[in-house]
């Protein structure tokens, strides 16, 4: 099975998991996981795995996301739900953790409103989120996110090592 087909097969279950899990415990981020300041308290992250380490109780809180990260555990340093409030954004930044120098990031759009546009900008190029069209990019490049819709924007983020991705077709990914 192609990697894109596998990831897309998880989309309905990830949406259901997000919709049925209380995310009240998720903190608003003042800094991202790499210590960089985020300009507003408008971005929540439900972490399953960061820097190759599973978060406490990740398997119980997010079993579907945990299962997806666990499929290729040794090649997957990061997996999380990223939630942006309506009409908000994440300022341009780079992810500089040494572990990520050998990884590419995939945004799997899950939930957003059709009342506007949800997008990701990487190195000056804008990508509009569409369900079933994961965006793959190098997150060591400057990137930002924007949710110009009337509802929350939910993306599942998963990183894979470049070596792992070199052995898979990336056809169908937006890049």
Image: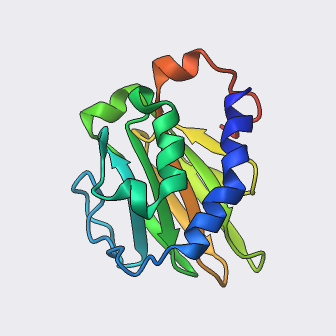
Left-right relation of 59 to 105: left
The picture places residue 33, in percent across and down from the top left corner, at: 28, 55
User: Where is 2 relative to 43, above or below?
Assistant: above
- Where is the N terminus found, in terms of image quarters? top right
Q: Residue at x 50, y 69 (%)?
A: 83
The picture places residue 68, in percent across and down from the top left corner, at: 54, 43
User: Where is 109 relative to 40, above or below?
Assistant: above
Q: Residue at x 59, y 15 (%)?
A: 167
The quadrant in which residue 61 appears is bottom left
Front-lying residue, 56 or 128? 56
**Residue located farthest toward the bottom when viewing the structure as drawn:** 150
**Residue located farthest toward the left when viewing the structure as drawn:** 35
Q: Is residue 102 visible?
A: yes
The picture places residue 48, in percent across and down from the top left corner, at: 39, 53
Left-right relation of 167 to 75: right
The quadrant in which residue 45 appears is bottom left
- Where is the C terminus found, in terms of image quarters? top right
**Residue located farthest toward the front when viewing the structure as drawn:** 60
Q: Is residue 92 visible?
A: no
Question: Exactly how many numbered labels are in the figure?
Answer: 0
The quadrant in which residue 171 appears is top right
User: Where is 124 relative to 150, above or below?
Assistant: above
The picture places residue 27, in percent across and down from the top left corner, at: 32, 75
The way the protein has been coloured in the rendering is: rainbow
Q: Residue at x 71, y 58 (%)?
A: 12
């Amino acid at each position: 099975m192609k990697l894109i087909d596998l990831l897309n097969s998880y989309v309905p279950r990830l949406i259901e998991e997000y919709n049925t899990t209380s995310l009240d415990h998720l903190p608003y981020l003042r800094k991202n996981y790499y210590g960089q300041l985020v300009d507003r308290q408008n971005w929540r992250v439900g972490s399953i795995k960061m820097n190759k380490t599973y978060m406490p109780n990740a398997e119980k809180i997010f079993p579907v996301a945990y299962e997806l990260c666990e499929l290729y555990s040794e090649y997957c340093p990061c997996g999380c739900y990223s939630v942006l409030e309506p009409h908000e954004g994440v300022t341009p930044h780079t992810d500089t953790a040494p572990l990520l120098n050998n990884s590419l990031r995939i945004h799997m759009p899950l939930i957003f409103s059709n009342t506007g546009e949800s997008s990701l900008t990487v190195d000056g190029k804008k990508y509009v989120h569409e369900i079933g069209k994961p965006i793959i990019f190098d997150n060591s490049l400057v990137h930002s996110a924007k949710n110009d819709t009337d509802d929350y924007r939910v993306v599942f983020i998963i990183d894979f090592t470049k070596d792992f991705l070199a052995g898979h077709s990336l056809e169908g990914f937006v890049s």
